[in-house]
Amino acid sequence: MITTSKKLISFNSAAVHAGKRERDQFGSHIAPVYQSSTFVFDDVQQGKDAFQGENNVHIYSRLGNPTVEQLERAICELETFGLEDSELYQGMVFGSGMAAISTAIISSALGGHVIAQDALYGCTSQFLKEEAPLLGISTSFVDLSDPFMLEIELKKNPTTKLIYLESIANPTMTVCDIQLISEIVHEHHAMVMIDNTFATPYHLRPITLGADIVAHSTTKYIGGHGTVIGGALVLKKELIEEISLSKFRKNMGGISGPQDAFLLHQGLKTLPLRMKKHAENAMEVAEFLESHDAVEKVWYPGLKSHPQHKLSSSVFENGFGGVISFELRGGFNAGEQLMNKVKLCTLAVSLGTVDTLIQHPASMTHSVMDPELREQAGITDGLVRLAVGIEDVEDIISDLEQAL
């Protein structure tokens, strides 16, 4: 719990109440969906002032929408939970995680260089490798779990504007020292952007460690039920102005729709409850897999065998998330047989749903990634990714055991 000038509030309670606004004229308990493309002005002067940014009235839902803004406030409140200067930050939501990520990279790194973690979500890696160069953005991919590699890369690339990494790398589960990285990067007058999808603000809040921009695929744990696609950013309001992020979102058209924002906000309210169960289950499943004769290696930050377990234990709160990667002794063929034999677990990409999902990164989510970079990042052909759900853990383990 933290103490504010008004009341005592915990992160769990903050998730339930985050983003609240004044009651509407009907006293609706849950804020309504403002399913409108445009908004009416009282007179010409009000419309003129609105386009000059001189009042707070809404204009058009590609620019902003009351339902969307409520979700933006809620996500920002959780990502900045406990910060004394949280009012300096703002959330921005998008129609997908990639819309949020690509818009932020373009606006913050245009004409410059990006140093990216070698293990990243496949589409992020593909965007940086193939599309970003067309916009004058160059990228080098390095192992950011080694700060020395970052130092070398910064010296080699003096035009670096942005360092990009994931709080828990997808799918290698690598964890980097965000605080140390931020200190090094800020000395070089660049920015740090963290995709916090795997950890969520329940486990980790990168802004408190020095990150400048936090991104989410809200499709995953924030939505929580696999029913909606979305993305989000949280950063300082002055940085939004500095990199013209609002203008890029407006003209690239990436804002979330009101119905999606409404559904995501409902999911956000139960984030702590779900993440607690995801993390508890994942820990037990990881221990089971690590002890099984058919399993070659398991990657999960909660395991003592994880290369960054000590770092993870010092920065993560309430557990280590719900995703596990592992490799079977029989390589890809053994993994294929496992994925075809599961009954409770579902063979599907994505993660963050209440049910357990299993997939093969090299042929599915990371198949779009440059093969050499995939090999460099340690995403082998035999790697299996398991997004552990909130079922009874005994049932998940029993399913995996019969499939193995």
Image (tube, rainbow, N blue to C red):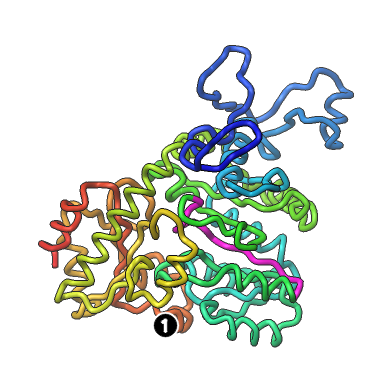
Q: Does residue 163 sit above or below 43 in this rendering?
A: below
Q: Nearer the viewer, residue 340 or 189?
A: 189
Question: As drawn, which residue projects farthest toward the left?
Answer: 402
How many marks do you count on the picture? 1
- Give x and y (percent) for residue 203: 46, 55
Indicate the amino acid at tag 1: Glu
Q: Residue 64 in the image: x percent, y percent?
A: 68, 37
Give x and y (percent) for residue 75. Answer: 57, 44
Please provide percent x and percent y for residue 235.
67, 53
Q: Residue at x 43, y 72 (%)?
A: 310
Residue 260 visible? The answer is no
Q: Is residue 88 above or below residue 196?
A: above
Range drawn in magenta:
188-201
Name the residue rendered at 69%, 28% in the picture.
38
Let me know if residue 285 appears in the view: yes
Horizontal side, residue 275 vs residue 347: left or right: right
Residue at horizontal 49%, vertical 48%? 218
Foreground pick, 325 / 53: 325
Q: Is residue 198 magenta?
A: yes
Q: Residue at x 46, y 37 (%)?
A: 269
Q: Secondary structure at mark 1?
A: helix
**Residue 5: in magenta span:** no
Residue underneath mark 1: 375
Q: Is the residue marked by circle 1 packed among few (<14), some (14-19), or many (20+) residues within 10 Å?
A: some
Quadrant containing the C terminus is bottom left
Dividing the picture into quarters, in which one does residue 334 lie? bottom left
Between residues 135 and 197, which one lies in front from this camera angle? 197
